[in-house]
Image (cartoon, rainbow, N blue to C red):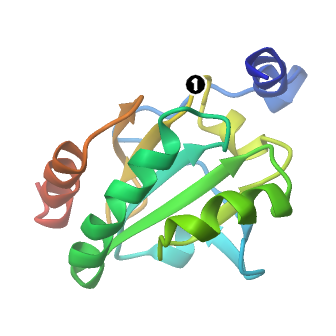
Amino acid sequence: MLGFFAVLLAGCGSDSAQPPKNGEPAPVFQAQTLAGDQVQVPSDFSGKVVALRFWADWCPYCRKEMTELQPVYARLHERGLEILAVNVAQDRDTVRRFIEPLGIRYPVLLDPEGATARAYGVNALPITWLLDRHGIVRGKIVGETTAEVFERQVVKLLDGN
């Protein structure tokens, strides 16, 4: 499965992109949520700190991390935190079977062809891109993180630092 993922994300020609750098505008994309709504990122979340979490059901760290971030989301959502869990290259039924037992309440976005993952230079999972309230890239967390580390980083952005 990892080999397939590497080939999928490698893309070809103009589809492959350099990952965004800190201080640059985040790559714009449109996606469908697991619930069926269309969203435009980052414009639909203007004024919010956005954590784009790229994941897949075969990722050994994703289940635990996604569950542990739910209480952080619940505490900080009213302050302006939005977590968007971007599933990479899996179908809606697979995503739904994985997500429903977790009880997470933050939006799950579908990236069935991996185009959004390529635009963000994702080459391993999990990875989280952090965007400020203006849609500017302000950091990333590569690999599994703890709720404490995640919260510390997003609170800095929520506080405007």
The kind of residue tagged 1 is Ala
Looking at the image, is 53 positioned above or below residue 5? below
Residue occupied by mark 1: 124
Q: Quadrant of the C terminus?
A: bottom left
User: Which residue of the protein is positioned furthest toward the front in this rendering?
Assistant: 101
Residue at horizontal 66 percent and vertical 42 percent from the top: 56
Q: Where is residue 102 in the image (x, y as percent from the top left)?
A: 51, 64
Residue at horizontal 60 percent and vertical 30 percent from the top: 122
Q: How many marks?
A: 1
Indicate the secondary structure of the residue bearing disc 1: loop
**Quarter occupied by residue 157:** bottom left
Q: Position of residue 87 (x, y in %)?
A: 67, 51
Closer to us: 17 or 53: 53
Left or right of residue 84: residue 1: right
Q: Position of residue 67 (x, y in %)?
A: 41, 58
Q: Position of residue 97 (x, y in %)?
A: 73, 62
